[in-house]
Image (cartoon, rainbow, N blue to C red):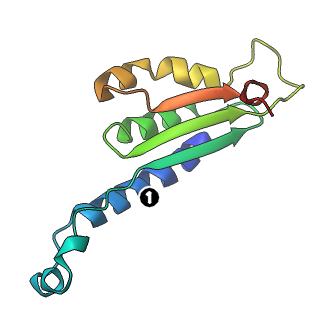
Amino acid sequence: MHVSSVIEKGVEFAASSQAHFLSTPPEEEKQKSPQHYKHALTYFVLFVLNTGLIDDIPRAIEQLARAINMPLSVYVINIQNKSLRKDDLDASVLEQKCKFLFERGNRKFLRVFEYSDLGF
């Protein structure tokens, strides 16, 4: 599974939204409704449902590095795949390899869950 392209789109969306809300509006727009500007900050949560192996971990780490200061959290949910062996790479490897990013960003913005652990 190419999870990096999904994360990349999430980062791009969060970045464009952040730029929009932090931009300074034209003066005539401020006069019309000054209370609507710079008060609405958003936070995004990206859910990735994973049914297989993540085969682009280095690229996914690059995209997650872009998310350090973005208003974005990424949740990877591993859907049970009986064809995977215990020693196969999965999303939990991505979480382990991103520990240095969590320290730099001072928050844990990537979490990996097993579908069975969610209680459904």
Residue, far right: 82
The quadrant of the picture occupied by the N terminus is top right
Kindly identify the amino acid type of the residue bearing the numbered disc 1. Phe
Q: Is residue 1 visible?
A: no
The crowding category of the residue bearing disc 1, from other C-alpha atoms within 10 Å (few below 14, some 14 to 19, many at least 20), is: some
Please name the residue shown 56% across and 25% down the image: 94
What x and y, as percent, mark residue 59? 50, 36
Image location (x, y in percent) of residue 101: 37, 25
User: What residue is at 25 percent from the left and 62 percent from the top?
Assistant: 39
Residue designated by label 1: 13
- Within the image, what quadrant is residue 105 found in? top left
Seen in the picture, residue 19 relative to 27 is either above or below; the reply is above
114 sits left or right of 95 in the view = right
Horizontally, residue 89 falls left or right of residue 99, namely: right
Q: Is residue 108 visible?
A: yes
In the rendered image, the residue lying farthest to the top is 87
Up/down of 75 relative to 26, above or below: above
Quadrant placement of the C terminus = top right
The residue closer to the viewer here, 44 or 99, is: 44
Instruction: State the residue at coordinates (66%, 32%).
Output: 54
Percent across and percent down for residue 75 are: 58, 36
**Quarter of the image where one finds residue 103:** top left
Q: Position of residue 88 (x, y in %)?
A: 74, 18
Figure disc tally: 1
Quarter of the view holding residue 38: bottom left
| Residue 93 shown left or right of residue 89 in the figure | left
Secondary structure of the residue carrying tag 1 is helix
